[in-house]
Image (cartoon, helix red, strand yellow):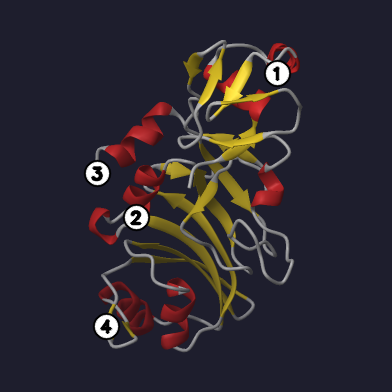
Amino acid sequence: MGEIVRLQKYIAMSGAASRRAAEKMIDEGRVSVNGEMVTGQGVKVEIGNDRVEIDGVLVKAEIKKIYIALNKPEGYVTTVKDQFDRPTVMDLVSKEIHTRIFPVGRLDYETEGLILMTNDGDWANRVTHPRYESSKKYYAVLKGVLTIPELNKIRRGIMLDGKKTSPAECEIMEIDMGMTLVEITIHEGRNRQVRRMFEAVGHEVKKLRREKIGIVELGNLREGRWRYLTSGEIEYFNKK
């Protein structure tokens, strides 16, 4: 199913006229949808499915591909809609981005940090598919002091659901007040993987932030804000 938009927006997306000019064309009876003349505002059409003509000439809407990086705060779900009416990542972008986009992969409700969003399904598949092994870097605050033997277990891989995780890069950054700050990079995307890996060696994750996916980093992007990806960042995943 393609994106459903108002007829005047469809015409504007095709480049045939501005929205205001498109509304005038509709009022004048110059626009048809699937062979039927439209003379009232508010009609919606499906991009890629409905046939729109102006003065008998076919016009086609072009959907601009969008790729963004968002710094998700804790307390947002990484879905387009939530059955429990919790805030979603869409709430953070919908006021500025009016094309339908979706999150690439997921971050837990209580996890913060980098999430990618797009309307390009093929590109999203390259980011998330295990075959392409996009690395993901996190910072985690653990309850208790992580020992060297436990650290080495994380590095070698942990058995989860009967299957061992791929080797991870993991470093202890700081130990303070009975808590351990670690940096960990994984190359998979199993459900709640980082939290479950540390739980498997006896440490609850008190705070978790994803810092990097592939070459895309949070940098100084503020919590709750987003930015467009650079052409180099987009192409990085296309080349994988």
Are dots 1 and 4 in contact, CB under 8 Å?
no
Q: Which residue is mark 4?
A: 163
The answer to which image quadrant residue 176 occupies is: bottom right
Residue at coordinates 71% horizontally, 11% vertically from top-left? Answer: 21
Q: Earlier in the sequence, mark 1 or mark 4?
A: 1
Q: Amino acid at mark 4?
A: Lys
Q: Earlier in the sequence, mark 2 or mark 4?
A: 2
Q: Residues within 10 Å of mark 3 (few under 14, many from 20)?
A: few
For the residue pair 171 and 103, the one nearer the viewer reads as 103
Q: CA distance from mark 2 to mark 4?
A: 19 Å
Judge from the rendering whether residue 219 lies leftward or rightward of residue 163; answer left or right: right
Q: Secondary structure at mark 1?
A: helix
Q: Which residue is mark 1?
A: 26
Q: Amino acid at mark 3?
A: Lys
Evaluate whether residue 77 shows in this view.
Answer: yes
Evaluate whether residue 97 shows in this view.
Answer: no
